[in-house]
Image: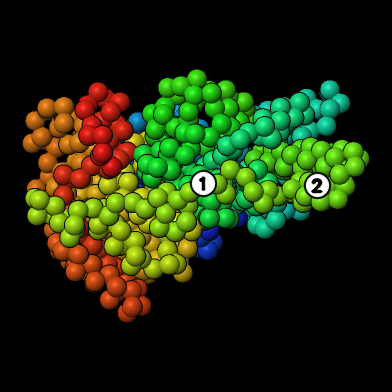
Amino acid sequence: MSDTTLVRALATALAPHSRVAFGLMGNGNAHLIEQLGELGVRYVAVRHEAGTVAAADAYTRVSGGLAIATTTYGAGFTNTLTALAEAAQARTPMLVVVGDAPSTGPRPWDVDQEMLAAALGIRTHTLSVTNIARTVERATAYALRVRRPVVLAIPYDLVNTPIADAEGDVSGDAGAPSSRGVDLSDPSVLAALSASVSGAEPAPQPERSGTVSAMDPSSTAAPHARPADHQIELAVDALLEAERPLVIAGRGAHLSGSVVELGRIAAVLGAPTATTALGRGIFPDRDFDLGVTGGFGQRRAMEVIESADVVLVVGASLNQFTMRFGDLFGAGTTVIRVDAEQVAAPKTNRPITHQLLQGDARDVLQRLISGIIAVRENAAGAEGAAGAEGAAGAEGAAGAEGAATGWRTTIAGLEPGGALRERTTGVAGGVCPDGRLDPRTVAARIGELLPAERHVTTDGGHFLGWANMYWPVASPERMIMVGTAYQTIGLGFSTVAGVAAAVPGTTTVLSTGDGGGLMALADLETAIRSASSCIIVVWNDGAYGAEVHLYGEMGLDQEPMLIPEVDFAGVAAALGATGVRVRSLRDLDALRTWTEAGAYGTILLDCRVSRSVVAEYQREIQRVNGLDVPADAE
């Protein structure tokens, strides 16, 4: 036997993959936390086990790096399950390292953690005194390949057991001979075996510059599917024949690193652009961008999207909210979908044509651009050969690479302050008839006061629309929504720790509600302690707003949906932050003062807003549930 214990070998194997661990110490992980610290892995403590996963989730969404979440066994693990479900649904890779029942059998307080994780679609690797480094390597590769959390379970009785000599060198020496064997669960292995039998060449992967990211599909060995040439040709033909082409991008396009290609194909087509909520800021040219699609979108801009005849959708799930519950596309629209997975056509209320180009977004976009340019160059050459080499030939050659004209140049209202840009900022004076503030007015004012160098994280709830509608976003990783994939609330405060660890040089901005804020209150202390610069906006309407605006409108008793007014500013002040009760727009001047003073520490804005204002996306939910909605509601 070796002198190296299981947790020492585990920490040594984990350290090359992640430089930060978010955890809550307990019996099952205390020794691991000690060992990670000795190896230089930063440890960030949270106050509720759900926060370990939520913080790691936020860290990865912002930085692209892989994080560790760690808790003890039993109750510690079960407390993570909602956050784990969110991370799995959101496709966030992470290593969740937890204590587990002894190898000799469960105790009264143990549960079947592997089955609980499996119910969420999450794989568990239970460690033993052999093959620890190999197990960690495979778990990490799997997490990156499928973009989901993976659980590494430490049997309680083996924590300080010496590993078997056969474990070999655990130093992570890249020059050491590999003893991994053949992993038939790895698609790259199966693809290589298939290629060797068929003689076919695997699909080429586009080159990527810079450091490999945990969120970058190229960080795994698994090859992408690749559309056949005839599929590309059909898509090129449809795009060239379009009179009103549109390009929509989502988070998948961001993960693929296809920003340049997105901007180029939009320019080549002369197409306006739009994004999903998680893709905001991805297009390099904002002059022709229609903004976010779905219920967060500007109403007139959504009408423009509905009028498009061919829509190129890149890396977007087209869920019910993005699709405006089936009303996003007009009848007869051709939707060309670029996605790394085999996705089904979106649910629509009108007939559309759906063409899937399954593959890496950068590769597919490059092929589409090349195809479009080639067709245009051939057309220009034919015109020149027919005797129009002069002005017409020159114009055709110039138009092959980029369209100086196109549908997007004819769309009125895209100019700053234009009809497709403006949004209502609420009632005059910003105060509703019930005496509380209009959240739209508050959101617009906060948007003007936020520091430019910021990263925004939001909890789930009715208030979700305000940040998405009124706060500009520079790039997709600067606005994350932890909770929306699983439709949960109460993860907001802990995500501050993840964002702050990922980008310590910027201001972390959290948008949360009073209901979710109370649910996550333990980690308000975590947020204040972990972030050197943080703004917390609590949309305090004294209710679970989404329920009020749906079930309350259906006639159900609203009493269970209401929350007695909570003084979040007072709680924050007690924990060391600057707490501001925002009852008038003038109270928001405190944010300007805080920013001008250096934006150091945490300021919490306890915004007492009216629940009489209903977000437009919530109006769509009301409509699909059969409620009458005012025609002019926005």
Q: Is residue 187 above or below residue 607?
A: above
Which residue is labeled 1 in the image? Answer: 411
Circle 1: element type: loop
Task: Name the foreground residue: 404 vs 152.
Answer: 404
- Residue at point 36% right, 50% down? 469
Residue 415 horizontal side relative to residue 313, left or right: left
Which residue is labeled 2 in the image? Answer: 392
Point out the tag, 1 or 2, that comes first from the N-terminus.
Answer: 2
As drawn, the residue found furthest toward the bottom would be 597
Asked whether residue 505 appears in the rendered view, the answer is yes
* Of marks 1 and 2, the one in the foreground: 2
Task: State the count of labels.
Answer: 2
Please state the horizontal and vertical placement of residue 307, each as a whole percent of the image.
49, 34
Q: Quadrant of the C terminus?
A: top left
Please state the horizontal and vertical placement of residue 330, each as a whole percent of the image.
48, 28
Distance Cα–Cα, label 1 vs label 2: 26 Å
Badge 2: residue crowd in 10 Å (few <14, some 14–19, many ≥20): some
Instruction: Specify the amino acid type for callout 1.
Output: Ile
Please state the horizontal and vertical placement of residue 571, each as a whole percent of the image.
17, 61
Badge 1: residue crowd in 10 Å (few <14, some 14–19, many ≥20): few
